Image (cartoon, rainbow, N blue to C red):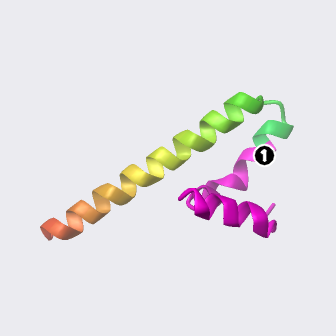
Amino acid sequence: MTIHDPSLRTALNTLKLGGMLDTLDARPAQTRDGELGHLEFLQVLCEDEISRRRRRARMVKELSLGVN
């Protein structure tokens, strides 16, 4: 499933949450399969975004320090 809704993409980008689009496709399947309720779905999306931001910050820091 690919997110085709431009208003969702715009809203996430406006909130600086565009990175969520990378993991958003996998999460609705877990919700449909009964693995995640609505609140768990939101929590997992937030945790995905936190992890993505931490990875990116670490990568930027390593690049600025010249770490390969």
Residue range in magenta is 1-29
In which quadrant of the rendered image does the C terminus lie? bottom left
Determine whether 26 is above or below 22 in the image.
above
Q: Position of residue 20 (x, y in %)?
A: 60, 55
Determine whether 2 is above or below 42 in the image.
below
**Identity of the residue furthest to the front in this view:** 14
Q: What secondary structure is the stretch in magenta mostly built from?
A: helix
Q: Residue at x 67, y 37 (%)?
A: 42
Q: Is residue 65 left or right of residue 14?
A: left
* Of residues 36 and 57, the one drawn nearer to the viewer in this rendering: 57
The picture quadrant where one finds residue 31 is top right
- Asked if residue 16 is among those painted magenta in the image, a careful observer would answer yes
Label 1 secondary element? helix
Q: Position of residue 11 (x, y in %)?
A: 68, 60
Q: Position of residue 57 (x, y in %)?
A: 32, 57
In which quadrant of the rendered image does the N terminus lie? bottom right
Determine whether 58 is above or below 65 in the image.
above
* Of residues 68 and 45, the one drawn nearer to the viewer in this rendering: 45
Determine whether 39 is above or below 29 in the image.
above
Q: Position of residue 49 (x, y in %)?
A: 52, 49
Q: Residue at x 62, y 43 (%)?
A: 45
* Of residues 42 and 16, the one drawn nearer to the viewer in this rendering: 16
Q: Residue at x 61, y 38 (%)?
A: 44
**Identity of the residue furthest to the right in this view:** 32
Q: What residue type is disc 1 on?
A: Pro
Crowdedness near tag 1: few (<14), some (14–19) or many (≥20) residues, C-alpha within 10 Å: some
The picture quadrant where one finds residue 65 is bottom left
Residue identified by numbered label 1:
28
Q: Residue at x 53, y 59 (%)?
A: 16
- Asked if residue 36 is among those painted magenta in the image, a careful observer would answer no
Residue 68 appearing in the image: no
Residue 45 appearing in the image: yes
